[in-house]
Image (tube, rainbow, N blue to C red):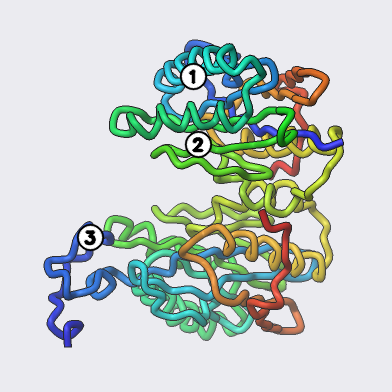
Amino acid sequence: MAAAVATMMPNLGQQISSKNDMIPDWTSQEVSTGTTIMAVEYDGGVVIGADSRTTTGAYIANRVTDKLTPIHDRIFCCRSGSAADTQAIADVVTYQLGFHSIELDEPPLVETAANLFRASCYRYREELTAGILVAGWDRRKGGQVYCVPIGGMLVRQPVSVGGSGSTYIYGFMDSNYKPGLTKEQCLELTAAALSLAMERDGSSGGVVRLATISEDGVERRVILGNQLPKFSTH
Amino acid sequence: LRSVCIVVLLREYVSSKTINKVIQVHDRIFCCMAGSLADAQAVTKAAKFHLSFHSVQMESPPLVIAAASVLKELCYKNKEELQAGFITAGWDMKKGPQVYVVALGGMLVRQPVTIGGSGSTFIYGYVDAKYKPSMTKEECLQFATNALALAMGRDNVSGGVANLVVITETGVEHVVVPGDKLPRFHDE
């Protein structure tokens, strides 16, 4: 099969032309979670959301991806960038956090999880392409969202978006977010923002996955393509 | 009363903070420039000449699509050398208010609302969500001002002054909003 013959290309992201026209581009492209991810704090927890598209070049390798990865009982991360890099980092942090939590004999802080992500992303910044949102609930500070973009910076924000599709929704987010939203309003805002980004960004699409994290636990839901909020088509 | 919604994105230059990127190419036709300003200015000057000549030949005001086509021809024929995009908007007797976009390579397409420039990426979501067909003039102005303010808030090379123009059958109205008078949104 042509796919089996394709050689392993070096980890360089985009290749302008394949060596052989018989071998499609996507066999030599790195797998990327193109993505739009978003996380919003509300009083009592956080709402996180992501699209579900994973691409290798122009091919959609997985159209129902779950980019909301549990790191601990009340801490999740939203992954964007290289699928391999983010999965590897998330696995490492899950292990480190689990160990730390057992040592402490109490649930870990969201800030701790975010710092563990930051430590890995910063130390190996030259080799990694990973943009991560860490969000969760702990007893000390309630709902928190931390942003760890490419390069390994760490900053806490009340609302944060990430991934390739995020550029299209900065304006929407700035105009629609206000401090003091309720959980339902946060869910609506996230679903609307993600739909708008998925409409414009080629690397984002599929379904919208949402999760709410609070003291009571984690509640997950999926909004299918035909149920997404619709906006004026022009 | 249908009005034309023009969204102009202004870049901050070292040399001038009040560069006008909305050029009048005819009485009721305006052109917004984006890309390399030198290229865009050269093209609009050439287009202005072609259009006035055409208008004299036809003995009537030019159609908006004629203005857009002139720009498109220049952009398409010289696509290797040029790096300029345009939004052409105006009013004519045949089709009323229209908005056309000429993209970088010379594609010409009509749209009810369009945005361009480096700051435009940040407001695609906002424009998609907030635009409704058949808004009033005041709603349109508010919509455009908000969109510009949001883009200027996020794009580091957009800023300074917002230039807006309202074109109707009866005439042309300029609205200038300095940066400090723009609407403010949630600033984290």
The residue lying at 52 percent from left, 12 percent from top is: B53
- Residue type, mark 3 in image: Gln
What amino acid does circle 1 point to? Ala
**Residue A15 in sight from this viewpoint:** yes
Rendered location of residue A136, percent (x, y): 64, 72
- Residue A148 can be seen in this image: no
**Chain containing the residue with disc 1:** B
Q: Is residue A105 left or right of residue A191?
A: left
* Residue B76 higher or lower than B11, as above or below: below
Q: Is residue A18 above or below residue A155?
A: below
- Determine which residue is flagged by label 2: B102
Of labels 2 and 1, the one closer to you: 1
List the single residue furthest toward the front: B58
The amino acid marked with disc number 2 is Val
Q: Marks 2 and 1, Cα distance to the nearest angstrom?
A: 13 Å
- Residue visible at 50% across and 40% down? B108
The span from disc 3 to disc 2 (Cα, nearest Å) is: 29 Å
User: Could you say whether the residue bearing mark 2 is in a helix, strand or loop?
Assistant: strand
> Which residue is label 1 attached to?
B47
Sequence-wise, the earlier of marks 2 and 1 is: 1
Q: Chain of mark 2?
A: B
Which quadrant: the N terminus of chain A?
bottom left
Q: Which residue is mark 3?
A: A15
Which residue corresponds to the image point at 47% horizontal and 56% vertical from the top-left?
A149
Task: Determine the residue positioned at 49% across, 83% down.
Answer: A98
